[in-house]
């Protein structure tokens, strides 16, 4: 699966995903493509309607706490990921929290897109988070 992000600064976003997620830059711009694990992230600046998407305007998210979707990244060792990402300047909402089924935390990319980082723990043994 490939995920498209409308970004305000392609170079800044490209550096973020390549650095924080050890991504491989496949294409620098127009559009920018970064391969992260077995997924692709495409980044391009916003724009107005096109013939195949009339009445649609693409723009980066507005600064807000309301979100309707987010990236979900699973890692084998969340403590190692968290330490490495913080060392590189990533800002997390909280430290990793144990939710029984998984350990998880969230960070935002340079445009404010929310990203969940999680490590499966209890769910591998049929233990799920409290509701």
Image: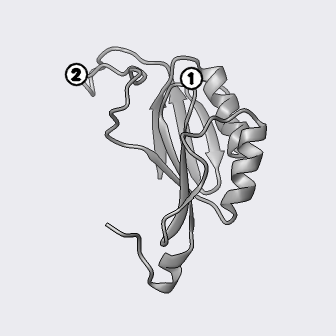
Label tally: 2
- In this view, the residue in front, 24 or 92, is 92
Q: Label for residue 120?
A: none
Where does the C terminus fall, quadrant-wise?
Answer: bottom left
Do the residues under discs 1 and 2 have CB atoms within 8 angstroms? no
- In this view, the residue in front, 75 or 45, is 75
Image vertical order of residue 119 relative to residue 115, above or below: below
Percent x, y of residue 45: 49, 19
Q: Residues within 10 Å of mark 2 (few under 14, many from 20)?
A: few
Q: Write the residue at 47% across / 53% down.
A: 1
Image vertical order of residue 8 relative to residue 67, above or below: above
Q: Residue furthest bottom?
A: 125
Q: Write the residue at 63% across / 61% down.
A: 75
Image vertical order of residue 114 relative to residue 72, above or below: above
Image side of residue 62 versus residue 51, left or right: right
Percent x, y of residue 79: 71, 58
Task: Kindly state the secondary structure of the residue where label 1 is placed.
Answer: loop
- Quarter where residue 53 is shown: top left
Q: Write the residue at 22% across / 21% down.
A: 54
Q: Write the residue at 49% across / 28% down.
A: 112
Q: How is the image coloured?
A: one colour
Percent x, y of residue 62: 38, 20
Task: Kindly state the secondary structure of the residue where label 2 is placed.
Answer: loop
Q: Label for residue 54?
A: 2
Marks 1/2: CA–CA distance: 20 Å
- Quarter where residue 28 is shown: top right
Q: Label for residue 30?
A: 1
Q: Residues within 10 Å of mark 1 (few under 14, many from 20)?
A: few
- The tag earlier along the polypeptide, 1 or 2, is 1
Percent x, y of residue 118: 55, 59
Residue 2 seen by the camera: yes
Image vertical order of residue 88 relative to residue 63, above or below: below
């Amino acid at each position: 699966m490939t995920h498209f992000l409308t970004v305000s600064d392609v170079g800044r976003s490209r550096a973020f995903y390549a650095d924080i997620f050890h991504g491989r830059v496949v294409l620098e711009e127009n559009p920018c493509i970064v391969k992260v694990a077995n997924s692709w992230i495409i980044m391009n600046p916003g724009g107005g309607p096109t013939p195949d998407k009339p009445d649609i305007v693409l723009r980066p998210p507005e600064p807000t706490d309301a979100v309707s979707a987010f990236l979900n990244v699973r890692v084998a060792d969340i403590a190692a990921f968290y330490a490495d990402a913080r060392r590189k300047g990533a800002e997390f909402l909280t430290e990793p929290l144990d939710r029984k089924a998984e350990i998880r935390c969230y960070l935002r990319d340079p445009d404010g897109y929310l990203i969940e980082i999680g490590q499966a723990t209890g769910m591998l043994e049929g233990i799920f988070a409290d509701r």
